Image (tube, helix red, strand yellow):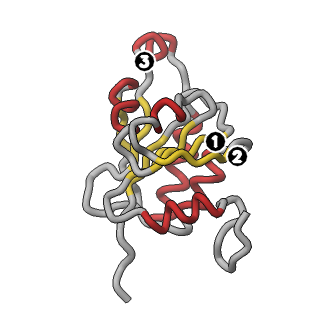
Amino acid sequence: MVVLKGVPRIISPELLNVLARMGHGDELVLADSYFPTSSICRHGPEEIRADGHSIPDLLEAIMKLIPLDQYVSEPAYVMELVDSDKEKGLRTPVWDKYQDIINKSEGKPVQIGRIERFAFYDRAKTTFAVVHTGETAQYGNIIIKKGVLPVD
């Protein structure tokens, strides 16, 4: 926990440090509890542990600190359902939570893209960091792309 004015308590010192070091266009994975975080992070991204925290709670806190990239059509991505889950009609209500949090934070509707499962893993290997959470919702993973703050 970081005890600083304006920094949500759910943000750890390690996560705050990562957010501060990320540059425009750098990406961050918020990974559910099933995500192969340690394996993915062997390929480069930093591993941040946030066990016990949900992704919606972390996403809401992170969005208070960084903007999304306004120069791309999809500054966030979720993992697309595999065909068998699509055929079963699997619902992903956590995606609606992400959409609401992001839209509210950005003050406008924001397009969230979908990436095929193994392409998502490959993309995660190129991100700045992976935050491993306690999220248990299926398909709870999300990648966000950092933007820039407006000039005063």
From mark 3 to mark 1, how far is it between C-alphas? 22 Å
Q: Is residue 18 above or below residue 85?
A: below
Residue 133's disc is 1
Say what amino acid the circle numbered 2 marks: His
Q: Residue at x 61, y 45 (%)?
A: 55
The answer to whether residue 107 is visible is no
Tag 1 near tag 2, CB within 8 Å: yes
In the displayed structure image, the side of residue 137 where residue 99 appears, left or right: left
Q: Secondary structure at mark 2?
A: loop
| Badge 1 or badge 2: first in the primary sequence | 2
In the displayed structure image, the side of residue 135 where residue 78 appears, left or right: left
Q: Secondary structure at mark 1?
A: strand
**Looking at this view, is 94 or 52 the one in front?**
52
The answer to whether residue 24 is visible is yes
Quadrant for the N terminus, please: bottom right
Q: Is residue 39 above or below residue 64?
A: above
**Looking at this view, is 34 or 138 the one in front?**
34
- Mark 3 = which residue? 82
Numbered disc in front, either 3 or 2: 2
| Badge 3 or badge 1: first in the primary sequence | 3
Q: Secondary structure at mark 3?
A: loop
Q: Position of residue 114 (x, y in %)?
A: 37, 35
- Mark 2 = which residue? 53
